[in-house]
Image: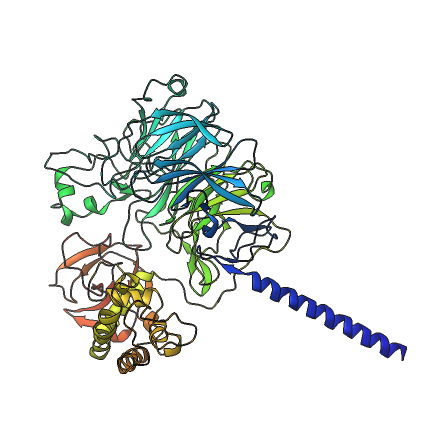
Amino acid sequence: MRVLFWLVLAFSLVQCTSLQKTADRKTAAARMVLDKSGYLYDPLDTSCDGFPRLQVETMPGTCLGMVMPRDRAVDRSNDKSFIKPRTILQITGTQDFLVVDMGGWSPQNGRLFLLTRSGSAPYEIKTLKLNLETPHGLALGPDGFYYIGERTRISKFHLKNNQVTDWTMVVGNLARKEGYMHPLSQFVFDPRNGDLYINSGSPSDHCVVQGTGAYKSCPEDQAQGNGAIYRIPAQLLKNLPAGGVKNYEITALGLRNSMAMAISDKGYLIQGENSRDFAELEEPYEEINVVDLDNGVGRHYGWPYCYNFHATSPEWLFPENKNLPLHKQFKKPVDCAQANPSGIGDYQAPWLLMPPHVAPLHMAYYKGEMFGDLFGDKLLVTWHGYQPTGHRLVAYNVDSNGLPLAKESGSTFGFNQKGACSTRKAFTPHGGMARHGSYTEIISKWDAVQGIRPKGAPVAFTEASDGSLWIVEDRETRSIVRLARSAGANHQEPCDKNAAAANDPQVQLLAWRSAVKESPGLEEGYRKVQTELIQKHCLGCHGNMQAQDFGKDRFSNLDFLVKNEWILPGNLERSKLYGSVARVEGYTPMPPADKEQIFGTAEGERVNKIIAAWVNSLPTDIDNRYGQFKMVDKRNVRAKPSTSATVCGQVAQGDIVYLDPRPATVISADGYKWSRIYMVPSHSRLYKQACPAPEDGVYYISR
């Protein structure tokens, strides 16, 4: 009896404990909120060092917590809120922070906020200054002033009793012009002597020819002094004239946009280059450049003539581009092959390459104690890019001079894959690899998961007095998050290790275009969806349901449906396009309430049948219609499968290309076998204006 009693009691205790845990989970689940930023979290949770833990994968021993979500980022006294927050800095001797919000691209809409502790919530924001002109840069100067960068000027100020005082112009004539592509003022101080170094971004992507001047070089790069880094000596900062400093020195040229800069204690300026834009996912690579402030001032770092280590920009690479205005009006003044620069104006190749399209926006050496064992003294960099390589916080090991460590071989980079594990890709840049390097991902799985988190948009970070990292996100997220130590396990994202290797999403769009274009039935079904649903009932919604990856054409609606996963071939119930119109449970009803309603009407039934017929007929093998291949030699790219067809471009040995691998699509003509190659419009290997861009991006190369 005693044994039975204890068994029953033990069973009861186990059951009660289990029920209590279940109840706790339900209570926590009931508290979960999905705010406007797209993060799902429990606002009462304090498990990430006092802040709500976010479901973002970070390195072991760390966690990412929510400090200021978009919903709460509002000054209740004047309704001013986050629009495009960019930089953050802890106020000396306090637990409060300054936050710069550039206010979008509207003139004089920027604002400076105070992020301060609150009684009702951990933090709240208060407005300190309004009507700033696209501000960005923020730093504490060696003179104890806070410095802030606006479009054409840098100012400094004190903060007393949470009020801005002593606002003073430091420099007020930074070279900018209307329509400027990179107008933000970022800057950094030399820790050795207090000299100020300022970014002057390029006005365009790869230089715009204006007027008819017989330029010898890109006027943006030379005459206008853009695409450069300026220096203002500390002595001038100590004795500011009225209206600020009027003159500054040029320290480095040929840098498209130096948003990420840091200076080591040994006098080396490390720059993260936001390289020019190519349409393809694999090129160009972003760069880490090094400026020796004592012995290497005045070097040219390549833009707009060179990219990667030693690749020549396509405007000058192909003789077929010789009639371009850019090519005709000025020559390339730097030698992209130069390996040992020695004088002013010589080409200086990058120190290392970063992955393509990562968009480095901020960097700093970590000096704190909280993460000393994980990444102490390393160079941290935010990758803001929206492509699968971006939205990360990474760390580079550095040498005694503060330079990122190089190695002999083996450079790879992470590449996020939707619904699958991240993969690693080898560095294969145009122009070859001159030096290899590696990095550690501190925040990695920051891609969008609907209902869980948005795609990360890290702009800048600051190291707080306790060693934690406070990170500002812009885009639609508009939040401040905090990286801290965690005794519990870090969040790890489940993934499918057997999923296929990642491909360029734009190539997938081209493959879809090709599939619809070459099938009369699919093309007719698509036309009906456009005319009977989108044009009649959806104009004004979701940007008219058009994606603009390739501009606006007859397939822009298809691009939207594929890109935003509104269609799932062969699975009607999980296709948002059908589910929303047919009012399947769980889908947002379409059309919206302010438009004519068709659900439950004869018109609605007719439209449902059109959608169903088309979705059910869509091919389920699109991903088998293109694949990555590495070129073993050079090949001309032609408009048609024939040796007499127009040559539209040229792919080189080592290039990663996307071919249609299906044997049935190989064409025999003129003694050759021809494969279909997918190339996005404005691909860097296509000659400019040589061929009209095909709707589906299909060209041909001989095998």
In this rendering, the answer to whether 365 lies above or below 455 is: above
In this rendering, the answer to whether 230 lies above or below 98 is: above
The percent coordinates of residue 464 (x first, y second) are: 54, 38
Q: Nearer the viewer, residue 598 or 258?
A: 598
The percent coordinates of residue 245 (x first, y second) are: 33, 21
In this rendering, the answer to whether 31 lies above or below 120 is: below
Name the residue at the right extreme.
Answer: 2
The percent coordinates of residue 659 (x first, y second) are: 28, 65
Q: Quadrant of the N terminus?
A: bottom right
Tell me which corner region of the image, top left, top right, bottom left or bottom right, holds residue 221.
Answer: top left
169 lies left or right of 191: left
The percent coordinates of residue 386 (x first, y second) are: 37, 53
589 lies left or right of 146: left
Is any atom of residue 408 visible in this view?
no
Q: Nearer the viewer, residue 198 or 215?
A: 198
Residue in the picture at 21% in, 30% down: 223
Is any atom of residue 452 visible in this view?
yes
Q: Quadrant of the C terminus?
A: bottom left
Tell me which corner region of the image, top left, top right, bottom left or bottom right, holds residue 605.
Answer: bottom left
Q: How many marks?
A: 0
Q: How is the image coloured?
A: rainbow
Residue in the picture at 16% in, 69% down: 671
Q: Nearer the viewer, residue 205 or 307?
A: 205
